[in-house]
Amino acid sequence: MTTKLLHAVVSGVLGGGVYALMAVGLTLIFGVLDIINIAQGIMVILGAYLSYALSVHLHIGLFVGLLITVPAMFIIGVAVQWLFIRPLSGRDRTSMSLLACYAVAIIIEGVLYWAFGPNYVILTASYITSSVHVFGFYLPYIYLYGFAMAVALVVALYGMLYRTKFGRAVRATMQDRTAALLVGINVNRVAALTFGIGVAVTAVGGMVYGATSSGFNPNSGYDLISRLLAIIILGGLGSIGGALAASVLMLTLESIVDIWSPTWAVAVFYAALVLVLTIRPAGLFGRQAVRAQ
Amino acid sequence: MMSQHARMIALAAAAAVATATVAGCGSSSTSSSPSATSPKAAGPIVVGASLSLTGDFSADGQAFERGYQLWQHDVNAAGGILGRQVKLIVLNDASSPTQVVSNYDKLISTDHVNLTFGPFSSLLTTPASAVAARNGLAFIEGAGGAPSVFTTPANEQAHNVFDVSLPIQDEMVPFANWIKSLPASKRPKSAAYPMAQDPFADPPVQLTQQTLHQAGITTVYSKIFPAEVPDYTPAANNVAASGAQIIVLGSTDVPTVGAFIKAFQQQHYTPKIFIAAAGPDQGAAFTSAVGAGNANGMMVPNAWYGGSPNPQSQKMVAEYIAKYGGTASDVNADVAEAYAVGQVAAQAVKATGGTDNKKIISYLHSGTTLTSVQGSVKFDSLGRNGAATTYIFQWQNGKFVQVLPVGAAGSVKILNPKPGWVG
């Protein structure tokens, strides 16, 4: 049983890295724009499909392909913000942005159905199905790479936020949009670039999700979004490190419970969320604390 | 800036939208005929069906649509039924049990269809058939074989459900019998039974578990996992850790099987025997998702396969390949199930001289044996096809072949043990 438990913990931690890659963009966008990008799930799938298309049609490796998919998703993100989010204003902006993002999700889903059809596809590479034997466990390379990328991405985003001029503008906008405007920050530009970055990092999450999942089709994004929302709420809305911590916590918990009851494993995922929010309503790394940093 | 309160309201709204979307209530669209006119005596026979063109069952739903359309094309090319052309209305239920009810309400009340054909999956057939029952319509379907579909109060009263396919409860019996028939020295010692929480997937696996347990095969894993989770890896890892020699997977679709195969590869674990309730019967959709090499040795129960010697099936397969390409092994079993629904309905309409559903229900319960691309069809009092024969199929070097029962016409030698994973 100890071996099983240890294996579950290791699997959960590594799986948490994959979810962190998908969730950081969502929490970053919320932190700056105060909107919930309900299209994040389909954006993940879009990123996976871009990697798939490059891999199958142009024979470009999954990691090399990120050099193309990340900028492509950045442009898509900026375009979505410009076309659908920016025009929204007034008191109903946040709730209307939900509908706008939902519309974006439906549009992208329709395009993907048109382009790729309904059949499930997979990303293939030797490191996806192979694994390394460590301390009696087989650890899949793709999960190890995914976790490493999640940590690197979080560090990079922190570096951007706290070591660059643009990062200062982003944090100022996060703390007080009106005050940021008053000190001369172009908040519209910050919002567009942040949305673009949030979607761009999703390209990485999409590739790793596509490589670790059992297959994906244009509908797969809907199974993800509720989990990603739970992760960013638990981690603390707007907290990038919180997204990583919450992903690891949730997936580890789920993996452990799965030993006894796979049915309850999913329920525990959300039960943990409720429990933590009861004790810490702002999440593990609540936004108030984040904004005070 | 928004207040914390406003943010939480927005978040709740987001969760609600996400939940509604996951439930598949997002969209509905019409394909084929955009609208239906009220039926006239000499007008077309209007057939209505709800299919999962998007959502979790979209791969199966779209394959089913191809089957219905292929049948419609063939029957109209042959002059229609009783000289009347067939008009097919397909609505998209987005894989939602709620939307499927609305769709059949619309098909019956607004489009005034003459006949209702079933959706994909037992999960959707159960609520959909109740709508047809309320309106006195026969509900001929090909993908609702779970025991719970037939024992609803609506069907026990109206007796309107007719499943042209195999009743799923006993579909793995030839497999269990084959295991039992193996000499003790060659018989596997342990088995794992992971099952998706689905009315279709579990009954045959549970029956197999019971049979193999009585045969002395130790159960090392038997758990039900949710059917709709993005990641089956934890459950698959636990199955791999059990080291079972036989895997009997209660799967509903290709991704479920794919997840287990991928996790088994990562864990360097290959069971000697691997059978899944659904997934490997999906033709090219399966091999493209798991890789042709990994499909090798995978088994699945069914009543039909692309290489079936049934002349009606051969004609349908040839037409399908001419239209969509591929090989006989690539044809999804859903296509045959849908096509068979149309064939049975056509025979009932011809026999009763029209589309009076009361007469059709009575005729289909009369004990008459009908024909279809899947073989003979004969309904019992609850609409189960008692004439269907269960076979076990296996992927062997890129071909989908019949392997069980041993000695049955068309059965070839089974590949045992299953070859290792590749790639």
Image: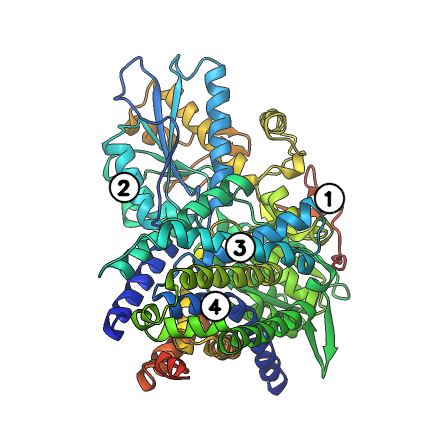
Q: The N terminus of chain A appears in which quarter of the rendering? A: bottom right
Left/right placement of residue B218 relative to residue B48 reads: right
User: Which amino acid is tagged 3?
Assistant: Met
How far separated are the C-alphas under marks 3 and 4? 15 Å
Q: Which residue is mark 4?
A: A23
Visible residue check, residue A215: no
Q: Which residue is mark 2?
A: B131
Q: What colour scheme has been applied to the protein in the rendered image? A: rainbow
Left/right placement of residue A239 relative to residue A137 reads: left
Label 2: how many residues lie within 10 Å, few (<14), some (14-19) or many (20+)? Answer: many
Q: Which residue is mark 3?
A: A73
Label 1 marks a residue whose chain is B
Lower sequence index among marks 1 and 2? 2
Same chain, labels 3 and 2: no
How far separated are the C-alphas under marks 2 and 4? 41 Å
User: Which amino acid is tagged 1?
Assistant: Gly
Same chain, labels 3 and 4: yes
- Residue depicted at 55% across the width and 51% down the height: B278
Q: Which mark is residue B398?
A: 1
The answer to which quarter of the image holds residue A270 is: bottom left
How far separated are the C-alphas under marks 4 and 1? 39 Å
User: Which amino acid is tagged 4?
Assistant: Ala
How far separated are the C-alphas under marks 1 and 3? 37 Å
At which x and y percent is residue B410? Answer: 69, 37
